Amino acid sequence: MIVALIALTGLVTLGSLTVMSVQGGITAVSHDRHKSVALYAAESGAAAAMDYLRRNVKAGPIKFSEYVEPNNVSPQKPGGIVGNLAQPGTAGNLFSADMNAWYEVEILNNLDDPLLAVGDDSDERVIIRATGHGPNGAMAQVEWEVRANAITGLGRPCPSYGQKGMAEDGAGRNDCLKNVVSTDVATYSPSGP
């Protein structure tokens, strides 16, 4: 009887450990899914902003001045960007309500612009910063630096992206840049350096 009781206690302990392990795995998978949803939302917001800028680029030497603020103190969040700031389940949100996702897009002047302090764009480059929000407070942020093109109006972002807190494309590759100086912030120039 004592041997049976010891064996039964061992089986119950083993079963409890298995349940805890499975629950931990489910939690980890859910967390990864939430982070992925937030990243997809951020990338979608950046793509929507790229389309918006492409359609609204101005002719002349100061193409993006109406979208930038002095020293980027209070970045613009244009309402004309499809889905920008639209909360889950509201009109304008491009994601299904069960995804519980949305994005917030800001347009900033690049820090190298000589007219950064006065809020004008003199080098025809801006930064699209998109913050994606997912379930359970998950957030991801990507930044694309885009440059206007004299022929087409607006260049394309690098095929990879910069995600806050990660190297380029998360792999440390150097697809569009000559040198990656920091893993936290990278500058991307469309069509190469």
Image: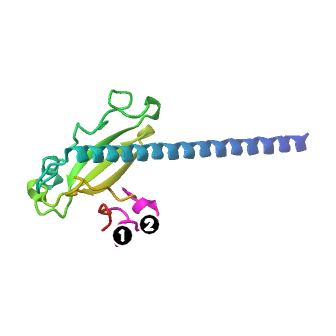
State the SS at label 2. loop
Hey, which quadrant is residue 23 in on the image?
top right
Which residue is tagged 2?
Answer: 172
1 to the left or right of 185: right
* Label 2 environment density (alpha carbons within 10 Å; few <14, some 14–19, many ≥20): few
> Residue at image x 35%, y 62%?
184
Closer to us: 188 or 154:
154
Q: Which range is magenta?
A: 161-185
Where disc 1 sits, the SS reads loop
Q: Position of residue 177 (x, y in %)?
A: 34, 68
Q: In the displayed structure, would residue 34 be above or below residue 170? A: above
Q: Nearer the viewer, residue 187 or 193?
A: 193
Q: Is residue 183 magenta?
A: yes
Which x, y percent locates residue 1? 91, 39
Percent across and percent down for residue 54 are: 25, 47
Q: Residue furthest bottom?
A: 179
The residue at the far left in this view is 118
Q: Position of residue 59 (x, y in %)?
A: 13, 51
Label total for image: 2
Q: CA distance from mark 1 to mark 2?
A: 8 Å
Name the dominant secondary structure of the magenta segment: loop
At label 2, the amino acid type is Gly
Answer whether labels 1 and 2 touch (C-beta < 8 Å): yes
Residue at horizontal 27 percent and vertical 57 percent from the top: 145
Nearer-the-camera pick, 50 or 77: 50
167 w.r.t. 63: above or below: below
Which label is found at residue 180? Answer: 1
- Is residue 166 shown in magenta? yes
The quarter of the picture where the C terminus appears is bottom left
